[in-house]
Amino acid sequence: MGTRAPDEPDADGRKGVVQMRAVLVRESGGPQVLVAAQLPEPMAGPGEVVIEVSHVDIGFVETQIRSGGFTEYFPIRPPYVPGGGVSGTVRTVGEGVDAGWLGRRVIASVGATGGCAERVVASVDRLAPVPDGVGLREAAALVHDGATAAALLERTAPKPGERVLVLGASGGMGTLLVQLLHAAGVHVVAVARGERKGALVRELGADTVIDGAEPEWAERARTALADAGGAADVVLDGVGGETGLAAFPLTAEGGRFSAHGAPTGRFAPVDPQEAARRSIALFGIADVQLTETEHARLAGRALAEVAAGRLRPVIGHVYPLAEASQAHAAIEARSLIGKALLTTGS
Ligand SMILES: NC(=O)c1ccc[n+]([C@@H]2O[C@H](COP(=O)([O-])OP(=O)(O)OC[C@H]3O[C@@H](n4cnc5c(N)ncnc54)[C@H](OP(=O)(O)O)[C@@H]3O)[C@@H](O)[C@H]2O)c1
């Protein structure tokens, strides 16, 4: 995908094609490689809809892809439009799509790219309707984090009374996990950095919050878990690297360990043989790669929790589309609590 002046013909030789505002990653690099662009309006093909975008969801992994990392998982080459999830209103429907979708408020995961634009195309199978009473801003915070949090709880199945250790508890997904676990009657030990983030995570329902900036955080977590009755039945590692690895010994024999996060640059390099020896079930990023319909189902579940007042998306900051680079910089600086979003409004 590329940019062109409005009076320049597009790839099919069409002139005067209507343009829309979008964001482009023009090359791999720091946040400054995110630039504003004018791109042709998308059209819905068979089985697709065009969504008028309200908000765009941004995740940590997108900053890593922008820097040129994680090519083994995301073989994406610049220039490309970043943004994998949106909330908005269905404006047009393609062939074979029920016209009943027209005008409906939805969220959609649109793949790894393409979301940072005023209009996007999505397969109808990817749509999750936004319930009345839930704003498009809150809904956008659930596109990936809500669906993945619901998937993680399905896979690792924490039961009431069990002890769960959450790493990266102050992030977009961590703040949802803490609330969902608390509501499920689980004892939550959460790791978050600094007083401000810790206070919020405690307010969301964590029984104990450990400051991840303290060198002895793992020992403190071990003590907190022991005070609650033993090692962690489940560890949800949204951080990875050495931090995730340090949490592995805190998992109970016969427990579950999910190494789905890698803001440190890599997933926790847990030894599968050691896990087998201690009868610990290992889960990883492959376990939360969701099919289109599974994604829509799980996102719908998270939306229903918000509609019922049992879940509150934590939105750290909403940036205009033109400030996508500031959003990426804030995520990398870990200065936000919860989610960063972009808005097509101002
Ligand atoms: N959201 C999804 O749908 C999804 C799906 C699959 C995998 N994941 C992965 O899960 C992880 C968490 O996702 P998220 O969207 O919740 O990310 P996020 O909002 O950026 O949160 C990650 C949290 O990790 C903590 N952290 C600890 N060490 C860090 C480091 N070295 N660099 C950056 N952050 C560090 C930070 O909290 P403190 O500052 O409090 O330490 C940060 O708030 C990511 O690796 C993501 O790729 C997410």
Image (tube, rainbow, N blue to C red):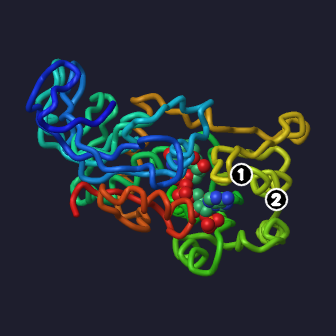
Does residue 344 appear in the picture of this structure?
A: yes
Residue 300 spot, x, y in % from top left: 36, 44
Instruction: Find residue 206 and report its horizontal and vertical position in percent.
Output: 61, 70
Please identify the residue farthest to the left as the structure is shown. Answer: 16
Residue 190: quadrant of the picture: bottom right
Q: Residue at x 30, y 57 (%)?
A: 322
As drawn, 83 above or below 12: below
Q: Which residue is mark 2?
A: 231
Callout 2–callout 1 Cβ contact below 8 Å:
no
Where residue 9 appears, as percent x and y from the top left, is: 16, 26
Q: CA distance from mark 2 to mark 1?
A: 9 Å
Q: Quadrant of the C terminus?
A: bottom left
Q: To which residue does mark 1 refer?
A: 234
Viewer-proximal residue among 126 and 326: 326
Left or right position of 1 against 9 = right
**Is residue 245 placed above or below 225 in the rendered structure?**
above
Dot 1 amino acid type: Val
